[in-house]
Amino acid sequence: MEASNIEPFLDGKTIFITGATGFLAKILVEKILQIQPNVKKLFLLVRAADTKSAKKRFTNEVMQTQLFSVLREKIGANNLNSLIEEKIFPVAGDISFEDFGIENSEMKDEMFREIDIIINSAATTRFDERYDIAMNINVLGALNVLKFAKRCENVNIITHVSTAYVSGEGEGVIPEKSFSLGETLNKDTKLDIDVERKVVEDKLKEIEAQNLTTKEVTMAMRDLGIQRATMHGWPNTYSFTKAMGEMLLGHYKEDLQLAIIRPTIITSTYKEPFPGWIEGVKTMDSFILAYGKGVLKFSFGDPNSYIDAIPGDMVVNAILAAIIAHIGNQYNSSQGFIYHISSSRRNPLKSSDIRLFLFNYFTKNPWINRDGKIIKVDMPTLFSSMDSFRKYISTYYWPLLKILELANLLSCRSFDKTYKDTKRKIDMAIRLAELYKPYLLFHGSFDDANTEGLRMAMKECNMDDVLNFDPSCIKWEDYFMETHLLGAVKHIF
């Protein structure tokens, strides 16, 4: 695919990206430089004290990653450095603040004049994040992006990265449908975002009066987020706050073009810039990590349910396709502005398949521990419900815990650490199971009719090769055995 096919759309454009040091944003920056070096500028929002610190953080956390090795080799290290110097402008700021707290007024004025495209990829993705933090980033952050966009003179489109799981624990085919302001998944409640903000403020005041430790404050605010999410029908703080962010954008966007990208479970890169690149422990990878190291001996998932996974580079391609289609009038946006970037409709992946892939991979490629010993894995025990998991815990672990507890009462101090470690592992296992249950026991599939429209638009523009986000081309066994698990071991273990 020649870059010239992209030129009518991104040539000379100035793009502003939030969450610039995140996993998706890094792939996005690399992809833009790869296919359209004639982009005018990339303003990248980086949480930092000042411009110098923002540049340093961008260099250390983005440019020095292996992700840019292909581009560096392709155009040469000096040319890449020159390209970065000319095109990329890290901006010190925080999405939680109005105007992102940008103190450099000259840069801010320049951004207002020049920005054509805004991509909001900033988010906290922790399922049980502190409610105040999730509210500031995922909800108010989205509103701050919109307010900033309205002060820009030439913005063509805001592309907001959300999650398909704003749908909650749905069943059947889940449509690419937007939320109305105040809508909930629990029809017995009504959501008022201002009330939710007041709940956060009141809880923080209450906590402050109790003189709690930092850890206790964190746990209290995490529990509050889960409570409020559950009350309104969402399974966790992440999906709840991302839904509220979508509501604000959709309600207040006025005549601004908006595209909301809803990826499912994001995995390592499929092909670009090379297969298997991943960074940080994602949803699925926490289980892979624990299983490969011999810590986790069970897995969740109804054998008949699907795990909806999508590679990170396909998500990035979809983001760019949405931008190109909307600003180039290649797609009838009246059909919708919500895009599920998913695989469950076109190329479903069974929970039982992943279990088999894990066993086969780590049997053939066992992890070596710090003592140089090979960790042998067994086929993980499958639990298809929380009830079956709790029964397993009560049968095999609680008796051990009770014995250790009795040993403590009898002043057998040598058992104290074993007791605490065992209890911590049990508590963590139950908490993780509750958090991941909505994703691993998910019985819905995501409609992608709007996304298919984008794919057709890219095909008509002869850009379907360079912007491939069609999951039907993925052979899951090959991808997991030769790409994702290999990448997880290399980049995470």
Image (cartoon, helix red, strand yellow):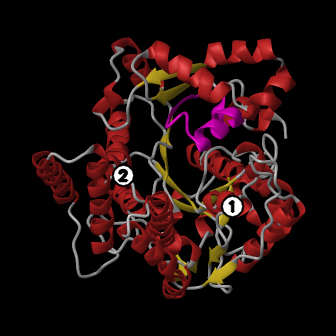
Q: Residue at x 12, y 48 (%)?
A: 205
Q: Nearer the viewer, mark 1 or mark 2?
A: 1
Of 403 and 358, nearer the camera is 403
Whole-number angstrom distance, CA of label 1 to CA of label 2: 35 Å
- Queried whether the magenta region covers residue 23, the answer comes back as yes
- Could one spot residue 474 in this view of the protein? no
Of 356 and 246, nearer the camera is 356
Q: Relative to 70, is 1 above or below?
A: below
Q: Amino acid at mark 2?
A: Leu
Is 4 on the left or on the right of 65, as rendered? right
Residue at image mark 1: 288
Which numbered disc covers residue 425?
none
Image position, residue 460 (x, y; %): 76, 54
- Could one spot residue 23 in this view of the protein? yes
Residue at image mark 2: 249
- Queried whether the magenta region covers residue 66, the answer comes back as no
* Image quarter (top left, top right, bottom left or bottom right) of the N terminus: top right
Q: Relative to 131, is 361 above or below?
A: below
Q: Amino acid at mark 1?
A: Ile
Is 271 on the left or on the right of 395, as rendered? right
Residue stretch in magenta: 9-31
Of 333 and 381, nearer the camera is 381
Q: Relative to 230, is 272 above or below?
A: above
Q: Residue at x 33, y 46 (%)?
A: 133
